[in-house]
Image (spheres, coloured by chain):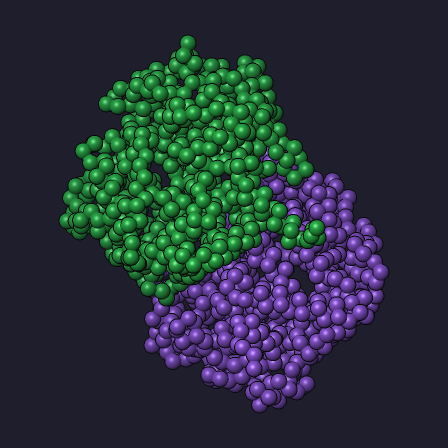
Chain colours: A green, B purple
Amino acid sequence: MRNHTPEAGIAAFVLLLSVPAFADEGMWTFDDFPAQAIKTKYAIDIDRKWLDRLRAASVRLNGCSASIVSPDGLVLTNHHCVRGCAQNLSTDQTNYVEDGFFARTRSEEKFCPGMTAEILVKTDDVTARVINAGEGKTGNAYIKARDAVIAGIEKDNCAGRGDKFRCQVLNFYQGGQYKLYTYRRYKELKLVAAPEEGMAFFGGDPDNFNFPRYDLDFSFVRLYDNGKPVATPDHLKWSVKPPTAGEAIFISGNPGSTERLLTAAQLDNLRARSLPDYLIKLAELRGRLIRFSSESPDHTRIARSLLFSVENSFKAFYGRQKALIESSVIADKRKTDLELAAKVAADPKLKAQIGDPWADIAKSLVVINLLRDRYNLMEVGPTGSTLYGYAEALVRTAYERDKPNGDRLPGYNDTDLPLIEKSLMDVRPVYPELERLLLEFWLTKLREKLTADSEGTKIFLGKDSPQTLAARLAASELGDPAVRKALWNGGSKAIDASTDPLIVYFRSVEPAARAVFKEYRERVTAVVGPAQEKIAKARFAVYGTGTYPDANFSLRLSYGKVAGWKNGETEVKPFTTYQGLWERATGQDPYILSPRWAKAEGKVDPNTVFNFVTTNDIIGGNSGSPMVDANGEVVGTAFDGNIDSLGGAYFFDETKNRTVGVSTAAITEALRKVYRMNDLVTELIGQ
Amino acid sequence: MRNHTPEAGIAAFVLLLSVPAFADEGMWTFDDFPAQAIKTKYAIDIDRKWLDRLRAASVRLNGCSASIVSPDGLVLTNHHCVRGCAQNLSTDQTNYVEDGFFARTRSEEKFCPGMTAEILVKTDDVTARVINAGEGKTGNAYIKARDAVIAGIEKDNCAGRGDKFRCQVLNFYQGGQYKLYTYRRYKELKLVAAPEEGMAFFGGDPDNFNFPRYDLDFSFVRLYDNGKPVATPDHLKWSVKPPTAGEAIFISGNPGSTERLLTAAQLDNLRARSLPDYLIKLAELRGRLIRFSSESPDHTRIARSLLFSVENSFKAFYGRQKALIESSVIADKRKTDLELAAKVAADPKLKAQIGDPWADIAKSLVVINLLRDRYNLMEVGPTGSTLYGYAEALVRTAYERDKPNGDRLPGYNDTDLPLIEKSLMDVRPVYPELERLLLEFWLTKLREKLTADSEGTKIFLGKDSPQTLAARLAASELGDPAVRKALWNGGSKAIDASTDPLIVYFRSVEPAARAVFKEYRERVTAVVGPAQEKIAKARFAVYGTGTYPDANFSLRLSYGKVAGWKNGETEVKPFTTYQGLWERATGQDPYILSPRWAKAEGKVDPNTVFNFVTTNDIIGGNSGSPMVDANGEVVGTAFDGNIDSLGGAYFFDETKNRTVGVSTAAITEALRKVYRMNDLVTELIGQ
């Protein structure tokens, strides 16, 4: 028998990590769900019918997930997924974010500008077409050929179907697979109910990604078509039964992005370079926004949504960085990378096909580090600026539309145009003071990072200061939808003739921005893409299939169970109750009960299961996902992960990674006893 | 002949790095200056007399360096070293920071509250006494014994000499050596001249740590004693000759801190944990302060000094982090650590003395990471808050004074008391709005980092919000010197009876803060100290002496020459001229000429050497240092390093690391032609 050396200990640990079938790991596609594993572990039969019903009731919203929960197009999601809508509907007189929004009749339901809902109806494998298009090409030619074939597939499949469908070619397994996803699209969504933000986000940023938790993070919207509620026979049954410890839970939704197939070198570069830089940028912006918010109630209101998003991103990426630093994932990856490379090298035929993609990735990282600042500052532009986004969309689309479909920049194909137009034409408030802050922050960072002597600073700032230039640009009239409409309709001629300060400015910086984009595409995208495809091919060849692809904001299903965890020395229980809410309320922000809830003590059942945690493997984008039981009935909506779940971007650890949801039992109790939405309850429970 | 393997290449590179005698590396003590190396490299004779004269004219200011440049106590330093004074002397009517300060007669010179000057007069080796005191002790007993003997040495040597002397025991070579430094102290300093900040810090934060540079970063103060200028026969001769390329330059001053003897594990922990955390904190505080500053001219004025310091620290530590990420220093260190450990292990007698200090350091890093947040937030407290500093000094001193000298916390010994009293009694403005911002920021981070459920948050925040508590604490009356005086004189009785909100608060949190401090001392300080001492001992035993100790804000001398460098593909010349200043001025902040300078074009000689760079090895704390030529005449004052110099905290790279100074030629030209300070010029050049 061999000695138990430290190396053997590490090997055993790696082995443990590489058998996902025993952990509740994976964001599985509905086409390829491991039903057998569920049967073995949970003794539950998941058949095609079960899966199809859940898929038909699963909804993708702007950046979120949701589910249909009544026959009349009623959709359950999180409060924070409708927050932008509630804010946009608010006025000087009514604050739907702070006070909540409750339509007690259908006529009180209010249109949410810019919100769309998409339901997946069909998936087709297009891998061969996409891969063949790039065969034998490199650099920009490779990218253009790929972009053109993808644009063609999307266009052909949605042609003649109006804007009721959306066709999207998605990349799975790092380019190992390409699929055409076809969605039924709804653009008329109305807000039905949203609790007071203070209750939905009780505990605010301090409690975000923490548990125990006491958040009423739900909301309802309704799908409309031509002014009428959409009939939705394929909806989920609403359960009022509270979840129980150990019970199996399934979560259907759209996890945004994971990077579990990255190489050790890529993870190491994230840890050392990209993540710290991003966190530092967010931290300063957060500081500026917090102080801005404190200046007046008006500033608090107009910055709230952006501040929430900045703080949420900050904590999420801080958690990722923490996971990379504190876990052994990079060292483990280094071993598995070397193992795969060795197996490729040992097989001459495979080696001839695969080559050395790890060397290409190493080279790409040098370029990523070299271009990071220029790419982020000159091409990506100011974080959070609505006006700059308008200018970019208007100017770029005008110039791109003059070209044939296959020659355009990605994101400006014919199938993309309706979405761009919609997001440009929707009425959304623009706050010049906030815009000024964001533009000034961006220009300051641009000069700081690129230095005053750089070409970039000369083009983007010239002899101005960030303050003076930001003030001038924020005076743009692009906040007016009529101005945007005229520019959109007028095309490149109108753009060239415009004297709007932001259009004039964007015209002047666009060539430099485009040059950086092109350089990034040629030196990074066109190198990393093929290298990752080769690694994916090598993985399939050496280890076979049977695993799940990285998240890409397409529909996935995860499985798990209701379970607490051990946080250091503390056993964390899987549930909280309304009783805990009363106890946690200090009367100080962010632990203030709304007036309705302050009066509800005694009326609401204190023992109702409020929030709960499960072992499901989810990530940002899953917000609002239905949590369903073995019968496919909805028992909650997922709204968060615990702090240990953030490393889920890179690896899954079942002992600590937890999903946090709010129970339908608690939602029903709130609708009945606090919000007096009896008709809505009737619609939900069907009585 | 062996193959030229990559390993051999690395070994050669390491060898190159480990021969400092060939590079202009080192912050040498005056006792141990490598005169022979200078003779070899520059053919200049540096003798004891030369060294003694420079030492007697070298001045330590609060956080800065300076030099005496006339027989009447006139002191040259940087503008940013007197910035606090100029700000404190400003009123609603006069803004000496913005408009500059120019005393054209002695009676116009103005007292700088809180400023002290110290001139090193004597050094004594006390290594044996300090080390013997801790012999055979561990943990808190070890620290107390060490602290007690150090306090005793300082007290005994300064006893009976009034407050005109300061005695300080300093640690060299990570505890390899302890020395008693005796300083002549001056507490009466008056401001003589300070340029407009816009000229001294022309290019602001964007140009900070960059070159080419155009900064008039000088100022003059004068030493007084009982209202009369101090006679200073040992002053430096003022040269108006511009420096020339290749000319040898010596810089005398007080480099604050380097960490060149840290182990690879310590550097790695800095890179992965401590530095990113610190940068993120500074970035958010910076964001809050920038927005605060933009709210009104008054806010700009009151936040300016703190914002400068936050931005300067941010850039400096960002540069350090960058150097750790981009250089091979950690990998190189890993090799030299292993080499030293192997040599210790190979010598049984040495091994018995040294043991395994590297293992102790590894253990200490785990504890540092565990305690970081609690230590920084509960014990270190709010960054930049003057009021909190007063409360801490008053409460801690009151309680510590009741104990025997040797039993007190470090920093509260009898020799420390006059300094604490002085800094408490000096009149300094307190800005409640800024205090509130700083206290709120701190309390927010405390709750965020420790979480709402922690003991720390319960003690420091309780049921309050950071906003409400900060507002209450900022209403403290400790900004009033009379209130502080009464509390100081009243001792622990007065402290216990005080109803000032900040005193009441600090009393309540002090036990928890002290407990964290104690834990940190026992588990980190008491472990790292002896481990580093053992490594220092091992180094002396294996490699002998002959190297320089890490910087510790004591007087050092560096040597080098005037030289540009290669920045990427660009050759950077070593000089700028006044001509470049006119060309760089855009009229936009921070590139605005002051009214005096706008009118000076044509009057000032455009070819005057303005700023210049040298290869000297300096670091923060050296600001204001005299740059002297081979004759010991002052030709400039150092005010910065280039961006590549920031890694100098951990290693020196002569190819890129540069000191930035402003020439005495440029200062003389400015005093004559722009500021019309003819009497001062006469005093300087002695005609």
Percent x, y for residue A119?
A: 33, 29
> At 37% from the left edge and 47% from the top edge, which residue is drawn?
A175
Q: Is residue A108 above or below residue B211?
A: above
Of residues A323 and B170, the one nearer the viewer is: A323
Q: Residue A463, percent across and down?
A: 31, 61
* Residue B361: quarter of image: bottom right
Task: Give the residue drawn at x 62%, y 65%.
Answer: B334
Residue B59 image offset from top left, x and y in percent:
63, 72
Q: Nearer the viewer, residue A524 or B89?
A: A524
Q: Position of residue B36 (x, y in %)?
A: 64, 86
User: Looking at the rendering, which quadrant does residue A642 occupy?
Assistant: top right
What is the number of callouts on the image? 0
Left or right, residue B488 beside residue A523: right
User: Is B321 on the left-hand or right-hand side of A513?
Assistant: right
- Is the residue A658 above or below the residue A292 in the image? above
Q: Which residue sits at x=60%, y=31%?
A: A564
Q: Does residue B529 appear in the picture of this structure? A: yes
What's the residue at 56%, 51% (across, down)? A332
Q: Is residue B95 shown to the viewer in this render?
A: no
Query: Which residue of the protein is positioned furthest toward the top in this rendering?
Result: A687
Which part of the image, by quadrant, shows the C terminus of chain A?
A: top left
